[in-house]
Each structure stands twice: as C-alpha cells, then as structure tokens.
Amino acid sequence: MLNYTPKEMVEREALVINPCKTCQPVGALYAALGVHGCLPHSHGSQGCVAFHRMYLTRHFKDPIQASSSSFTEGASVFGGGSNLKTAVKNIFDLYDPDIVAVHTTCLSETIGDDLNALLIDITPTLSEGKYIVHANTPSYFGSHIHGFFNMVNGFMKYLSVSTGTSNGKLALFPGWLNPGDYRELKRLMTQMNVPFIMLPDTDGTVDTPTTGEYTMYEKGGTTIEEIKSLGDCKSSLGIGLTISAPSVGFLDKKCKVKGDTIPYPIGIDATDAFILKLQEFSAEEVPASVENQRGHLVDMMVDTHQYTYEKKVAIYGDPDFVIGMMALCLELGMIPKYCITGTPSLTFEQEGKSLLEKYGVKEECKVQAATQLNTTTDLFLLHQWIKNDAVDLLIGGTHGKHIARAEDIPLVRAGFDVIDRYCHSYFPVVGYEGAMRMVEKITNALMDYQDSHCEEKDVEMVM
Amino acid sequence: MLNYTPKEMVEREALVINPCKTCQPVGALYAALGVHGCLPHSHGSQGCVAFHRMYLTRHFKDPIQASSSSFTEGASVFGGGSNLKTAVKNIFDLYDPDIVAVHTTCLSETIGDDLNALLIDITPTLSEGKYIVHANTPSYFGSHIHGFFNMVNGFMKYLSVSTGTSNGKLALFPGWLNPGDYRELKRLMTQMNVPFIMLPDTDGTVDTPTTGEYTMYEKGGTTIEEIKSLGDCKSSLGIGLTISAPSVGFLDKKCKVKGDTIPYPIGIDATDAFILKLQEFSAEEVPASVENQRGHLVDMMVDTHQYTYEKKVAIYGDPDFVIGMMALCLELGMIPKYCITGTPSLTFEQEGKSLLEKYGVKEECKVQAATQLNTTTDLFLLHQWIKNDAVDLLIGGTHGKHIARAEDIPLVRAGFDVIDRYCHSYFPVVGYEGAMRMVEKITNALMDYQDSHCEEKDVEMVM
Amino acid sequence: MVLHGNELRDKVLEKYSAKVYRNRKQHVLSIDPEASNEITANVRTIPGIITQRGCCYAGCKGVVLGPMSDNAIIVHGPIGCSFYTWGTRRHKQVETDRHGEHADCYVEYCFSTDMQEPNIVFGGEKKLKKAIEECMAIYKPKMLSICSTCPVGLIGDDIHAIAKWAREEYPGLMCIAFSCEGYKGVTQSAGHHIASNQIIRFIVGTGDHKPQKKFSVNILGEYNIGGDGWEIERILNRCGIEVVSAMTGTSCYRDMKNAHLADLNLVQCHRSINYVADMMKDKYGMDWIKVNFIGVNATKKSIRAIGAYFNDPELSARIEEVIADEENTIADEMEYYKSKLKGKTAAIYVGGSRSHHYQLLLQDLGMSTVLAGYEFAHRDDYEGRRVIPDIKVDADSKNIENLKIEADENLYNPDRITPEHRAELEANEDIDLNDYQGMYPDMEEGSIIADDLNHFETEEFLKALKPDVFFSGIKDKFVVQKAGMLSRQIHSYDYQGPYTCFQGAARFGHDLVMGLYVPAWSFIKAPWKNQATLVGKLGGEV
Amino acid sequence: MVLHGNELRDKVLEKYSAKVYRNRKQHVLSIDPEASNEITANVRTIPGIITQRGCCYAGCKGVVLGPMSDNAIIVHGPIGCSFYTWGTRRHKQVETDRHGEHADCYVEYCFSTDMQEPNIVFGGEKKLKKAIEECMAIYKPKMLSICSTCPVGLIGDDIHAIAKWAREEYPGLMCIAFSCEGYKGVTQSAGHHIASNQIIRFIVGTGDHKPQKKFSVNILGEYNIGGDGWEIERILNRCGIEVVSAMTGTSCYRDMKNAHLADLNLVQCHRSINYVADMMKDKYGMDWIKVNFIGVNATKKSIRAIGAYFNDPELSARIEEVIADEENTIADEMEYYKSKLKGKTAAIYVGGSRSHHYQLLLQDLGMSTVLAGYEFAHRDDYEGRRVIPDIKVDADSKNIENLKIEADENLYNPDRITPEHRAELEANEDIDLNDYQGMYPDMEEGSIIADDLNHFETEEFLKALKPDVFFSGIKDKFVVQKAGMLSRQIHSYDYQGPYTCFQGAARFGHDLVMGLYVPAWSFIKAPWKNQATLVGKLGGEV
C-alpha cells in the first residue's frame, strides 16, 4: 500500500501527488444542486460533467443530474456559444427546469467564451418564469471551493435584488456541507426562532427518499423566490471563512445587506458562536432543548476525554472543514498534528494557528494550505509527515484510506468526499448533534484500535 | 483470549459460563429510575445495590442513585422489616424523593419478608404527597427483564386508578431501552399527534446534561400523576413481547384499559407496525416528516444491501432487543445465524422462528432462549457455535467483546450493557432514525473489516 | 397498450423537438431481421442532452493507460481530470515479478502538474519538466506517461518534445506523451485510439522475452475490472496457455514490450482494440480471434476456439478437462441462480463490449435482454466488421490519428499456422478469425438498440419495458433505483467481481439474485400508503 | 464563611436526624494533633443511607480470589453476583509458565450455578456438584473455588462438604469453598478475611519450589489493578529480588503454594492483609514490613526498607542504582506535572489502603489532601496497629472466623535474620517491621477523615472543601463530574495505569494533568448563560 512513498522528505514544486482538492466546476455543480428546480450545466467538453456527476454520485449515492455543452474540437477552436444556445434550448424542451445554472470549465475559459454576453443573448429566449445564471469557474484557479462560492454568487448576481423592504430574515451562507448538515442548521435556526433564507440547501435534493418514484427536481433546495429575496434580508451570516466570506461580501456589495462570517459550527465552541449569532439576530432566549443538547455534548466530552487527550490526529480536506475538525479535536484535548488543505486559502493557516495558540498546544503542529505558487500540499506530503512522526488518527475523506491502511491508523471518514461508505450524508457533523456524533465516532475509532491492537492481557472489559 | 473454550460442543445443565442475563433487582432499579423524583431502594444486603449502581453507571456513565436496607447477618435471620422502616425514614429525611420504589433481592425473598405487609405499615408514616411502592424481584427467577416489568407493574399496582373518565391518552410501555430510544419514541408519538403516558422514561434521568450543577432528581421521568392517570388511558400499547406484555395485561386487569403488544420498533417493519398502531390511535395521516425519514431508511437499505446480504450475524442480549435486531438484520438480507438470550422467554423462540420463515431463510439458524430448567444459554455456548461455524458480525453488548477478539469478528455494540464505549445511550436504535443509525454501524463494521482484512490488491477506493 | 419495437422507439422519441428527433432516431432502432438495421454511432452528442458519455482523456488515461501497473502517469493540466481518474475504474493491479524483473504498481498514486493560471497564460512546459524531474527523483519509474487535458492542446505545450527530452535525460526511461485532450473525438473511443497508437509505436516489439510455454497469447481489450483478467489468466494457465501480455488490464510496460512474441491475440473488447489487433497482424503477422469470457457458454466457445487455432490434440484434451471441471464446480450454484432468474429481463447500457457480452451470460441464467446500447461504440460494434468500409468518418473523428503500419522487417512472422489450417479456421463458423460480427446477431427481434442512450431515453424506455434490472454505470444507477428498479453497475461491477469465465458467471448470478431478492425492495411503499386501510380505520374510529 | 475542621464536620452532619447524627459523628473527624482522634470503623451502615460499600462476597470473590489466574471460581447462587464480578476489577492477569508448570488464566470466564427457584426451595447442592463436574470436564483447572451468595447460607447448602467431595473425586484438584454470603460482616472486609483464611488453610505451605534468587519476597495486599503489581515486580526484579507470590494480584494457585518459602512478606494493603502477614509470621516465622509503592518517595522508602531488611551491601548498592535510574527517567515529566499540579487539593475515598497511599503520591506532585476516608477499613487502618487490642468486636463481625494459627512443625523458621539485625530494624524509624502506623500520621491538621463516606456527605464536603479532584469509584464519579469537578476512579484507575513505583507515578501525574486541564471543563457553562450579554444585546436590539 503506497509502497513507493519514501520517508525521506522530498522537495516538490510542480508535481502534485494524491491531491487534496479538485477543480472549480464540480463545486459550482454542487452549489447549483442546492437550488430548487435547477439543472446545473457545464460549459465544456462532456467528459467534465461525466466526472463531476460520478464524483458527487459516489459521495451521495443519489442521482446527480447535470448537462453539458458537449464541446468537440470544432467548438474548442471556434468558441462554444452555439453549443450553449443549442444546449439551453434542448434543456428547457426536454428537462423543463425552472433555472439553468451554467458554469465554465478550463476549456471554455481558455478559449475565452464570454458567458456574460452569451447569457444576454440567451435570456430573452427563455419562457416566462424560467431563468439562466452563470459563474466563471476556471479549473486552473483555486479549487472546488472557489467553484462553489462563485456559483452561489452567480445566483445572487442574476437574481438577488434589494426592493427596499426588509423581509426580516437572516441570509445564511452555509458553505459546502452534507444534506444532514443543512437539515441540522435549519433545525437550529428554527429552534432559535430565526427566520432565514439559506443558499444553497441540498437537503431534499441529493438525499432523496426511495419511494418508487423518481423525479428530476425533488422537493428540496433554495427557491428562486428566496434567492431573489436575499437582497431584502436584514443581515447575512456566512459560515466558513474561506467558502462563505465571498458571498457575504457579494451580497453586501450588491444589495447592501451587511453580514459576518464565522467558522463552520463544528465542535462546541464554533456551535456556541453560531447560536450566539442567531441569538443576536432573534434577541430571544436560547431554548431549553438547545441547551439540553449542548449539555449532553459537554457530558460526552468530559466522560470520554481520556481516550482523546493528547491523541495526535491528522486532518485533511476542505479548509473550513479542516478548521472545524481542528477546533473539535482541540476541544477534546487532541493534538491536531497535521492539518492540510489543497485549497488555496488566505485565512486557513492563520485560523489554524490561532486555534493552536488558544489551546496552548506545545507540540509542533503543521497547518498548511496550498498556495497559487506551490500547490503541492497534498496527501503525499501528509503521508511523508506521518511516516516521520506518526499520528493516532486520521480524519478526512476516502482518499486518505490508503495512508490509513499503509500505516495502520484508524480513519474517521468525514468531509468530502466519502466515496467508500454509505449513510454519512444523512447525518450532521455541524451543531451539537454533529459534534456528539463526531465524539462518538472519534472515541469509537480510538477505542476499537486499542481493543484490537493491545496485548491480550490489556484488553479491558470496562472502559 | 478465551483460550479454554473448546470447539467440541459440551453438554451443560448446571454451569452457566459467561451469562447473557443478570438478576431481577437491577431491572427493577432501572425501571424506577424512569419515574420522576423516585429513589429506587434495594431491600437486601448493601452489596446488591452497589453492584447494580456500578452496572448501570458503567453503561450510562451517569450518576445512578439507589439506597439499600443494608442487611446484616442479624437482619437475615430475623427479617428485614425494621431495616426497611429505618431506611424509609432516613431516605425521606435526607434525600427527599417524591417516591421510593422498593424491590426485593434473593436475600429478602429467601427469608420471606412480606413487603405488602411492611408497606401497609410504612405508608401511613409518610408525609403528604410522598409515596412508596414495591415489587417482588427474586433473583432466582427470570432475569433483569422480569425485574423491570415487575417494577413497572409495582408502580401501577400502588398508583394507577381508573376514575371512569378517559384522559384520551395512549399508555405506552416502552420496555427497557436507552434514553435516546425513549426520546425517539416520544418524538414519533408527538409527530403522529398521539397523546401518551409512557412508563418508564429515563430520558433526562440517566443522561443528564453536564452543566456544573448536580441534582438528585433531574427533570426527566414519568410523573406520579401520569402513573396514576394510566388507569384512565384510552388504550395501551406495549412494545417488546417479553418485557411489556405483562404490563399491558396488568393495566387491563387492574383498570380495564385494553391494549396490545408489538415487538420493539427496531428495523423498518417493526417501526411501520408501531406507526400503524399510532395511526390507528390518532386516526390521522402519517406526516411527511415521518414518511421522508422512512424513505431515507429505505434508500440506505437499497444502497447498502450488497455489503450486508447473506452476511451471517450472531445476536445476543435481551429477548426483545434480539428479536428487534434479528428483524433488522433480516431486512438487510443478513442471516441471523445465532440468536440467544439468557432471559427465559415464552415467546422468543417462536418470534424468532416466525421471522426466519417470513424471510425464507434456508440456512439453519439457532434461536435459543434459556429456560427455567436449563439456563445454560450463554455466551460460552454462543462462542462454541461460532467456533464450529463462524459468523461475519456480532451484535450485542460489551460482554461479547472477548469472542469478537478471539475470533476476529467485528462487534457492533448495542443493547445492554455497553460498558466499554461512550455516547451510545444518547442515540436511538428504535424508529427509522435508530434503524438508519444501525444500518450505518453495521455496514461500517463490515466494510471496515473488509478494508483491513482483504489483500492489498483488493482494497477498494470506491465502495 | 404496451408498445414494443419501433413503435415504442417512436413513442419515446416523439417527445423530442424535431431537430433532436431527427438525430436520435438514427441512434435508436428495434432489431428487424428484414431490415438493414443500420445505426448511427460514434458521432457527437447533442449539447444539452444529458449523456453518460465521457471524453477522450477518460478513454486514454482512464481506460487504456490507467491499468498499467508500472506506468507513472502524469496528467498535464488543471487538477480535476487527474483527481477523477485516481485509483482507476477498478482495473485491479498489483506489483509483480517476471523474467527476474520487478514491476512496481502505481495505481494508488495520482500525479498532476495541477496547472495554474500563469501556466495557462505563459505555457506549462517548464512545470511539466519539473514535475517529471520530481517524479523521477521519487519513483524512478521505467515508464512515464504524459497525458494532456483540454487547455494544453489549446495553449500549445509540446508534450511530445518533452517526452523526447525525458527519454534522453533519463536513459532507460520509456517516456511517452499522449495528446488526449477531452474535446477530441466524440467519446472515450478517441482516447483509446490515441493510447493504443502510442503503445504500438513505442512499446510493443521492444522486448525480447520469449514465452516459456508452448502456446501463448495476448489478451486485448481486457481491463481486469474486479479481477476479470486474473480469472481469465487462471483458466488459460490451467489449459497450459501462457498470457504474454494483456492490453491493458493485468499488464504492465515490462510485459507489453514482449506482446509481439505471443502466438495469437485474443480480442475481448471491440473497435478500439481490434484496431490494435489489426495493427499487430500487419506489423508482426499475428492472427487474432474474437473471444468472450463473459458467460459460461461464451467462455467455452472462446477456449475451444483457441484450442482449434493451436490445433494440438493434447491442448484440446486439456481444455475439455478444464471446462468439465470448472463447469462442475459451479453447476449447483448456476442451477439455483437460474431457478431464481429464469424469465427475467434486462436492459444493458455500457461503454463498449459488455453490452453485448453480458447478454450471453444473462442467457446462461435464463434471462433475456430487451434493450442494449453502447456508450462509445462504432457502427461495426453493432453491425459487424463487414460495414467498416462503409463507415463515413466525420470531422470530429478524422483528426484522430490512424497509424500507417508496415510489416516489421525483423519481427514479421505470418507463418504461425499453416495456410491449410488457416483455411480450415476461416471456414469454421464457431471461430471468428480476425473478425467480429457485432452485437446484432445475438439479439432477438424487436429488442431495442440505443446508441448513446441518454437520461431521458433511459427513463422512458425503462418505464415502458419494465426490465427487472438495468445494467449501467453509477451516473444512472440511482435514478433507476429511486424508481424501484435494480440497477447494477457493469462499469465497475458495484465493487464486486470478477465475473469472467465459470466462477465469475456464478458470482454474477449470485450478485444478481442478491440485488433482485434483497428484502429492501419490499419496503419501498409505506404500509399506510394503502389508503384503504386508513380510510377504513377512519371510518371505524371517527 | 469558609468552615473547616470540626466546624465543617458539624455543619455537614447537622442536617442529619439526631439518630443518624449520633452515628455518623463517630465516623467523621478532623485531624487534631491534640486529640485522640479515635474513629469508629468497620460497623454497619445505617439502612437507607446511600453508602458506596459493597458486601462480603465482593471482598472474597471480587477482590481476593478474582485475581488468581488459575483459579476457576464457581459462584453458587442466583446469576447476578457472578455476573457483576465478571472480568474482575481490572486485576490484570495472563497465563504464565513457571517451574515448568503452566498456569491457565480464567479471568475472562464467569461461572455460576445460576440457582433457580427450585434450587432455593429444595436445595442447590446437586446443581453445584453437577456444575463442578461440567467445569472439570471443560477446563480441568488445578484450583476450583466455590463462593456462596446470600441465599446459600440461608438454605444451608453445605459447600464445604461438596468441596471435600470434589477434592476426593478429582485427585490433584484443590477445591476450596468460601462461605462469603453478602450479608456477612458489614463490608467487603469480611470477605477478605474469609478468603484469606482459606488461602492460609489450604494453599500456602503446600508447595516446595524454593525461590531461585538470593532474596525473595511475597507481596501481600497488591491486586495488580491496571498492572500495578507487574510494575512492582519489574522494579524488584531489577534490584535482584524475586517475588515468590503476590496475594493476590499477579499471582496464581501454582505460586501461592510456595509463598511460605519466601524470605519476607511485603504488605502493601491494610487490615485484611496484614492479618495474613501475621498468620504467616506465626506459622512460618516470616517477618513482614509495611511497604507502599504508590508515590516516588514512598517507593524509594519501601525498597530501601527491603534492602535494610536483607542487609546486603551489594543489594543495597543495586537498589540505589535502580532508584537513581528510574528517578532519572521520569524526572522531566514529574517536574512538568508538578508545575501543573502544585498547590492543588484532593479528596480521596476508596476501599482500603489507597486513601492513604495516594496522599503520598499527591505530595510528590505538590498537592495536598483535604479529605480522606476508607470504605471498609478497621480502626487500625486509620490509627495504627497499636489500637488493635482496644477494638471492640461487635455482633456483625464476631462471626467472621479468626483462624487459630500455630507454628508449622516442619516449616516454621524464625531465623531468617539474626536477632541483632531484627533489633536494629525495630529501632529504625524508616522501617515498619511487622507494624503499620495508620493513615493519621501522614495527614495535616484540620483535614477531614470520613469513614464510610456516603453520598450526602460527599456532596456536602466537596461543596465546602472544593478540592480540585475527588478520587473515588464509579458510583460517585459522575455525581461529582456533573457538578463540574474532576473525579478519577482510584478503584479501577479509570481503565489506565499502572500507577505504582516511578513510571507509574509519572503516569498518574499525566492522567491527573489530563483530567484537570482537558478543555471540556471550560465549556460547562453555555456562553449565553452570561445573562449580561443577552440583556445588553436585547437592550440594543429591541
């Protein structure tokens, strides 16, 4: 397993090995799946969308629909405008979405298709009540995370307006999460009596119940009316500094809705911060149900601490997810020895270092994001670090499983993508509920490891 | 690990080895913890209650309070009446419960203390609004399951009355479950718009939040007023044929409240049956939220089936729990190769065989409960069976962990007791939610096993 | 009214706009023994139509090169394309030793130059060179491939020059560039050609390890999904036949170099690989026969054809022994699966040959196929090689290079069998010597053929035909299952397999019975959906 | 006003009814150097008071017999008591070989006759015999114990006769019966005595394997919780001292038989075991010294005392080397833990000796103990052995057998050291030769001593004294932690350990720092509980 990864550290600046990110368009596609009645459309060669649908389907085990401009060599030379026009016509004819969300690819970006201009041409051809929006998502810049917020902003760019009358709601930008997380965020906002519009929301679109009926546009997703109304929100809240700050900024710039961005509510402290933000908005007491669940979480944390304390963990994945898990692990007394993301992020390393300082971690920990200049912050690098100084636990997606097996380290799967397990997308990692779930998963992983790896005489009946 | 368990089957009729049950009093104690403001009291030597508190604390990682008559040799010879009187006075003086629930032990039963008579003496000495009830729970009959329903019936015997005016509620006897399960049952009844009284209910008594304050009687538990009002319920529903049928019968006999008993709502079919019972009561449509969650569960079951299909599982524990898990496993296409309980149950084997027939299981499966005549249905027997024909998975409590390690079989911990893990008691196994959780746990256990035990060339990135 | 055949086809397609209808009706037909059954294939998909097709890069890097264990493949382009082909499509691989030479296995590694905006603007050659240096420093591979993705072709990075540079810079390194940008051609098939061309150009013929057994073959177009290729090798080895190289499933650069030294090519897949067999016939004089190891009867026929080719009584006897033994091993199982599957129907839509091959395995199990289609086939894959001369090459395909092959002056050897025996073989109807007759002959009258079956047609045809199972890929699997119908991924075998030969057939039978009979299906409808129950109760209660 | 000492004691106890107050005030006192500090201990708990005490069976089966690896213990009674002692209290054990003899390890097995109603009514002897037969058939143990639970004593099953039958029926089997019904005595202590009596009566003195090293000891009252005993053995072995047998932690029947052949008994625990040391002194002439391996200084003192006893310069030198080396290994760690723990306070309430011993380890770490109590001690455990003659034996205890011991005619050997050396040792203040001075001398003035500390007093004293940590058992742990205070189980070490000797001290320091500094504590109060924040915001918002 990964037999050729040497222990001796190697300098790299060009070759990425086992990346910890993927490209913008798939992020745009996922964001678009969080809008009700939306068909995502990839403006490029049909291979892109085939890969993206495969990628998301592997994670969600649910239908992921998206169309393509199906560039051939000719389109690549002469421009993809006519492909897009044909595509849009066929899409509305055949699949009848309410809205088409177009994102670009490295192909259409490299040839320089002007989507703004194309959409100016196309929009008047649409039927009443049908929409088309776009986002530029060049694969050679940033990562899937950038694609995600670019598409969120694309929706707002085309749809959100400020009518001058407040709708009294909170605009919530939840970042890239699983449907189970989106459900949990909505549950918390509802419990906190905060009226909200959340963009996007894949609860009900990528985790549809099996009922014997398939429909292309399921019940879930942010509605077009809601996206329009974002401009009338009282304030906005972004969660995830890397992924949501741009949307908070965009809505402010376009519609003068002021807002703030906080980390993903992963772990107790960040969830407290989220609840406080909601309380600030609602100006109401925190209900007993929320407080009770928080107390359950604290109880678990106190009770399990000795199984997590000073355990070293490597966390990899998307920047806001990694920061969230890092906070949660620190709250459990763990040492987040290596935290990496392949997504270039201006805030990641600073956020991580602040957390290490906050918890007074003495041990040298590496917190590293890729940069535009050197993108080799990848799983090969992480594996090399681990070979030189091991960890007790891995937290991240499926692509770390070979490291886990090669080094015999338990892996708690979380984040994106998890393509070798089922059920995960239904359950949250955010909120107190999500933290409880993660505490259980982390302690079980460590305790299972102890049970199976200790000497027979050290097997404990009670733990 | 368990190195002296021979593969060759041995006949036993007297020696129980590694039992799959414990004694009545601890069941009575647990049932009493599900009543608000109640202090359980053990009428016997103080060792009993020390063991029982230890046992329950190990499972719940929460304070478990109970008092004892603290028999000495003298009391054992001359009877424990005066010990009980002293105890009751001291208990109300010092701990001020609303109610004391006395259960007997093999000691007080063997010497023949007449609790009915003693309580007739004691009751008039109590202050207004204070109560004392009792149950006879001889350790040499049945198991902790009998102790549980005997105590439930003890509460009803002393408190429940029929006033002639219906309260319009459903009397729910939920059996022995975790607080997370009781919460889920209440959530389902609330969603189904069924007014109910549930006895007992340890949600909020054995999973109290950590808040920096300790109080002896927490917010949870069935109230005395509710227990009284059980006699005015419209109908009753027992879940768990072994554990709850006696309470349904008792309430009918005492207060003429008719009722029915169904299996624990573990797995989809049994949860459907529970929902249908609730619908029968409410005569209302099943809400979309319930249906949606059910659809999620079906989705998981369809998606994961190839990891569970024909996998052989051994299930051990309490009779209704084992039947529930057996149903869930059969629904997943698994083969419940060995299903045992140490609790003598008149219905267990028939229930199990019906399930095997319903799913047309061809493979020979063993479904065995202990009997009064031969109680050697225990984990030693299960281990011997496994040595002769292995299984892929174990489901049960902590006491199977040595088998799991000895035979290198993954163990999904569920039921009672789980004393070597944390967090479990907060989450349900009942309802669609509980089934989703179990599907995740079962598939993860099997897939983790595959990932760690297959040849390197067979490690799959996507599963 | 239940429609079928062309009526059904017309009913489904009539929902299209006229323009789309005109296009799609050439791709969809119902088998009619009286008609020509000419189909349109290997042409571009209409923009906006939700196709399951992939791209040239997917065919080149994902399918052909990906499985080669000792081939370090650097994807030159932005990160995505490399990321999505990481770990291959379940082409199983492992390190091996042969001829005293070790072949590493790099399939767990994903290498990319991860081009950034400046590389697009100013060119990515420098970064690619650096990446090659870094890869050589860490892995020291014997073969290193460069695969380009869309922007590379547009900005004009000369990856072939860089490959040449690498071959010179690192003596002993076989560095090959593949210009497999995603926009080339109309499907993965273009990528297969591009990859195969380079394999023929650079690799085959460069080795000199002669086979050690009397009879030897290559297996072309077998990609070892779920271990399929290993199972075929096991059977051939039992018969006493050596596999010199697969292309490319179980194989590696080390072995592929010696492929020209085998006696015979076995062609398991279709167009993009029988083209390779043709080139090897022209260059080295090797015959090929079409084989199919999917299905018990197909496997028997294929092994017997190999026996017939070699024309050796001892070999033929051994082959019969192996067949008898393997069949015996699975007899009871197959009988059971047949009893559970008899009369059931299937639809199949996969990339290449499997849409044909699996029909034969389903027949073994008593099932029939009501619809089949290919994702990236050419006309001959449906209609047989006789139509090749008639196929028009359109603008999208004509830029895909066709190698000009001439007989190798040292290695050409057409006399592997006698002319008399060749004549016998050509006359033998059970043997497709240097020929493939397409999918049609194995399909029943009235069954539907759909090239480039898209999402809309999938939904509509399945609603109408109601097969018991739809074999396809992950992108449509869950669409179908939401509607309550089993779908098995025949691209990736749903992470099971192997399904080849005898034991594989039984395994397939097992998995199909599992999928159809798993209890989950019976729970799709909530019991309270039976409205009568509720109303009845409401009536009683209220 | 912060109360302390006896004022605090009175304040807490005044909430009791008069009757309970009169009882409890004899069990709780504040150390006063001027006063007699006489305490009441080893008397019955008042019914209804939530005590943490266990029973006679728990002491006999759970503590003393449970750890013996090769001892198959059949619990005769209903299932519960056997179930609850399954797996022991973390007395770690493992199979071993010694003197060419294998000792099985049965600690993963729980054996019960699981008496049913008919056995209670008609007697359980037959079932017990059958159970023994079944146990012998499966395990063929060399030692088999029968422990009776409450009903057995009442119904009169003669387990001793059955043990005798078994010894005759199975030659070579040491079968011993223990009448340890739960109602006997007032605490586990009764069970310790019952178990120890039988060990002295049946086991010790029956072996003839002489120690192989020049210096040899037994370790009495060390139960190998979390491997404590193994760590002590490691240190003693490093010094060149052989451990013949522990009683009973790391030991087994095989080794215990030879205990009388050791040179010296080390007594780690208190009353129930120094009684055993006394018996061995009387019967075999062995001296004993009180040791304590909990705490760095205590360990050093103990090892040096052993050195002093043996009076061998080479041994003493080796002891000093070992001490220096072990201390050096943990020096940095201890320094760090001290820096985190200095000035913190603790309360300790455990069964026996640990309430005393851990005070010394806490001192090593810069901490002090504000409250300590024993669950099942006798007066001498608090006040020292000098009070033994004054202890009144009440009705509850007088039925617990006291063996009459006489010098063994063959094995008695009082001359293991010279009379001169004994005189020296007796004069040495650092050595407790055949003596124990109790917990009091190590406690500070004003600190609280509470015998049989109950739930009510625990809550009240902890609220008043606010120690940083409460060391106790699982039954009170979570009560304390709900209130926001760390509680560590010093019965089971919270499934960690070992905590003995040098490395154990460091491990203890680590675990304590962990418990106190883990971030979870900082989250107990929800941030919105700071009402000011909300009001402020509400003011601003509304």
Image: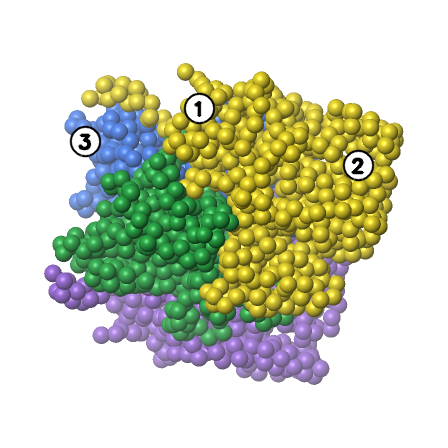
Chain colours: A green, B blue, C yellow, D purple
- Near-viewer residue (D525 or B199): D525
Residue C10: give its label. Answer: 1
- Which amino acid, by three-letter code, is at mark 3? Asn
Q: Chain of mark 2?
A: C
Q: Residue at x 65, y 34 (%)?
A: C389
Q: Residue at x 48, y 52 (%)?
A: A76
Q: How many marks?
A: 3
Instruction: Mark 3 vs mark 2: tell me if same chain.
Output: no
Residue B167: give its label. Answer: 3
Distance (Cα) linking label 3 and label 2: 78 Å
Q: Nearer the viewer, mark 1 or mark 2?
A: 1
- Which amino acid, by three-letter code, is at mark 2? Arg
Q: Quadrant of residue C111?
A: bottom right
- Give the residue furthest to the top: C1
Counting other residues with Cα less than 10 Å from the Cα at mark 3, is it few (<14), some (14-19), or many (20 or more)?
some
Q: C408 left or right of A354?
A: right
Query: SS class of the residue under badge 1?
Result: helix
Instruction: Mark 1 vs mark 3: tell me if same chain.
Output: no
When the figure is inspected, residue D423 is found, relative to residue C491, above or below; the finding is below
Query: SS class of the residue under badge 3?
Result: loop
Residue A419, image x, y percentages: 50, 48
- Which amino acid, by three-letter code, is at mark 1? Asp
Query: SS class of the residue under badge 2?
Result: helix
Quadrant of the image containing the C terminus of chain B: top right
Residue D326: tell me if it is visible: yes
Identify residue for label 2: C238
Residue C10, image x, y percentages: 44, 24
Residue C523, image x, y percentages: 42, 29
Q: Nearer the viewer, mark 1 or mark 3?
A: 1
